[in-house]
Each structure stands twice: as C-alpha cells, then as structure tokens.
C-alpha cells in the first residue's frame, strides 16, 4: 500500500497544488503507508529549469515529507521504485507500449488537428478538443492519411472500447464514462515521440504499487481511461480521491502562470509554514478555524475516515 504526490515541474506550485499535496500527504500518513514524491517532468517542452528543486524545497518548508522519491540532490533516486522522475522512466513506458502493441490495442495515427476537425461534421467535444473520429483505426484510411502527410510522424492511439467504466471515487462517489462515446481513441504516444501523460501515470502508479491516488478533481475525467489502461497492463487498480480544486476570489481556477497565489508571495509577507497549513486545511474544511497548525499536528487532529468525510462535504460544495 502506498500513496503519492506527482507534481509537474512546469512552474512553482500554487496554493491549490499545495493543498492537494497536503491532502495526499495526510491520506498516506493517516493510513500509515509510504508516501512517494514523483516528478511528472515528461512533457519536457513545458518543464521549467529549477522547478523540481523549488517544489521539493516548498514541500519541505511546509513540513510535508516523503518516504521515497525525488530529492534536491538527486531527483531520480530515493527508493525501491527508482527512478522517480518521469523523464528517466522511458524504458518502462516503452515496455508497456510494446505490451499494448502485442495485444493489438493501439494503432498509429497520421491525422493532423485539421483532419480531425474536418472528419466529423459536428465533432463531439471532449476536454482537449473534438473526439477523435477513428479515421486511422481503419488500415485503408490510415494508409491514405500516411500518403497525405508523408513527413508527419505517427502518434499512437488506444482503441477505446465500447465499454462503460464505472468506479467509486472515494470523495466524488460513483462515476461512469463510456469510453468510445465520451472519450474516443486517445493518444498514448505523441507524434513528437513523447509518451502521453495517460500512459506514463498508469505505468508509474502500477509499477510503484500505488493503492491510493489523491489528486485534483481536474483529472476525474481522465480516470476511466486510466482504469482501462490499468486493466490492459494487468496492474492493480488504485482507489481514487479527487479533491476539490481551489478557486480564486472570482471563482476561477488558480493557474501556475500568473504567480499570484505562489507560496513565495506568502513567505515574503512573513507567513509561517503553520499559518499556510492552517489556511489550506481550513479552506477545504479540514479544521473549523483558520489558525496556525503544523502538518504533524494536523495528523493528530484527524482520522482517515474523518479526513474523507470532511473532503466529501467540501467536494459537494
Ligand atoms: N502531474 C499532474 C499534475 O501536476 C498530476 C497527475 C496525477 O496526479 O495523476 O497536475
């Protein structure tokens, strides 16, 4: 049994990211299981130099610790499931890719963005644009697309089965998604050669023996796809805890880009780690008053079921 926090080092963590980190840490500590820090630095074009180190320093400053995973001096090492940085885990993704290929669950796709938009007269929209109409699923159509784009390297897509995935999120409750209709054939390896988040996260959680995935509710929509991959790769399917995202005063999601909710700003204003932990915990209903409290003290205040119940209430709001 183990839990994890898996930040993307694309900039400093904002308070919303830190709140998710705190909840993931609390969940693992209250369940008395190892906690892993994994750097999701796979999308190299988006990685900001120095960001991993900053994330590690910020988590440490807040009093959040981990039993395995990235450290400042050696982001790749730190335990039996090393390396803990996705950029160093390509051989594992390659192996999983081969397994999916052997089972004929994936196929190369030569379509451009424009092709996808044009292929369906009224394309169904998914979070990242239109649902892929399945053009390259058909070998003849694929050959035609390859002819049309002779210089375009292929992306690889997973054949979304006509199957409804149902799961019980520990916080959100029952969730169901029909893969072919609501998701479509999704990319597991991008045309630029990078493995997609959807594949990497499943391989990592599977191989690291993660039993509880605690993360932001923005990833709820990815979960059915990931369950499909967990099964296809014969890994244990973890429990999912999708925690509410922190919103700004206007009700918008926080973004890493504008930096207005960075820990650095709070630190410059003289706030202590305990004041930040107290604010974060109170903002999601884990404590009744906004007071100074250390992460360790917070563990003493809560039980695992108490944590879950308070988060269920916050998730409903
Ligand atoms: N790396 C992702 C993020 O920072 C989280 C992925 C996950 O927890 O599954 O949003």
Image (cartoon, grey):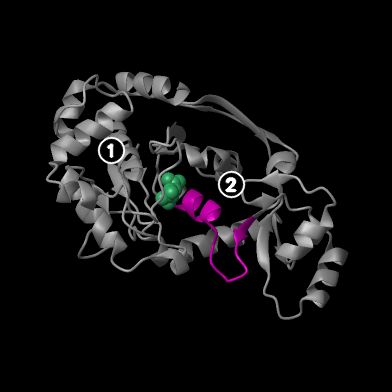
Ligand 1 lies under 8 Å from the Cβ of mark 1: no
Label 2: which secondary element: helix
Residue at the extreme right of the image, as rendered: 140
Residue at left offset 47%, top offset 51%:
201
Mark linked to residue 229: 2
Magenta stretch contains residue 237 = no
- Whether residue 2 is visible: no
Q: Which residue matches tag 1?
A: 22
Residue at the extreme front of the image, as rendered: 250
Q: From the viewer's side, name the closer residue of 269 and 110.
A: 269
Q: Does the residue at mark 1 contact the one at mark 2 (Cβ under 8 Å)?
A: no
Mark sitting earlier along the chain (1/2):
1
Q: Residues within 10 Å of mark 1 (few under 14, many from 20)?
A: many
In the image, the segment drawn in magenta is 187-204
Q: On the rendered image, what quadrant is the C terminus found in? A: top left
**Residue 100: x %, y % from top left:** 63, 56
Label 1: which secondary element: helix
Magenta stretch contains residue 194 = yes
Residue at the extreme bottom of the image, as rendered: 151
């Amino acid at each position: 049994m183990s839990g994890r926090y898996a930040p993307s080092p694309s900039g400093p963590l904002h308070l919303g990211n830190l709140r998710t980190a705190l909840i993931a840490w609390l969940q693992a500590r209250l369940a008395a299981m190892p906690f892993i820090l994994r750097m999701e630095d796979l999308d190299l074009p988006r990685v900001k130099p120095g960001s991993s180190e900053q994330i590690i320093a910020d988590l440490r400053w807040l009093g959040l610790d981990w039993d395995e995973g990235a450290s400042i001096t050696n982001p790749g090492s730190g335990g039996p499931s090393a390396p803990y940085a996705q950029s160093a885990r390509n051989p594992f993704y390659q192996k999983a890719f081969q397994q999916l290929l052997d089972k004929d669950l994936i196929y190369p796709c030569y379509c451009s963005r424009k092709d996808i938009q044009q292929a369906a007269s009224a394309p169904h929209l998914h979070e990242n644009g239109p649902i892929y109409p399945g053009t390259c699923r058909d070998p003849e159509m694929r050959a035609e697309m390859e002819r049309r784009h002779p210089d375009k390297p292929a992306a690889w897509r997973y054949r979304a089965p006509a199957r409804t995935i149902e799961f019980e999120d520990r916080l959100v409750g029952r969730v169901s998604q029909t893969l072919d209709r609501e998701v479509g054939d999704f990319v597991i390896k991008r045309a630029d050669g990078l493995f997609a988040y959807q594949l990497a996260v499943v391989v990592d959680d599977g191989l690291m023996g993660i039993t509880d995935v605690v993360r932001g509710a923005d990833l709820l929509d990815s979960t059915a796809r990931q369950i499909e991959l967990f099964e296809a790769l014969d890994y244990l399917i973890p429990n999912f805890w999708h925690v509410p995202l922190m919103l700004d005063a206007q009700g918008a999601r926080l973004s890493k880009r504008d930096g207005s909710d960075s820990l650095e700003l709070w630190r410059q204003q003289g706030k202590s780690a305990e004041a930040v932990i107290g604010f974060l915990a109170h903002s999601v209903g884990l404590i009744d008053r906004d007071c100074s409290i250390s992460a360790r003290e917070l563990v003493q205040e809560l039980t695992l079921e108490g944590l879950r119940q308070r988060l269920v209430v916050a998730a409903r709001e």
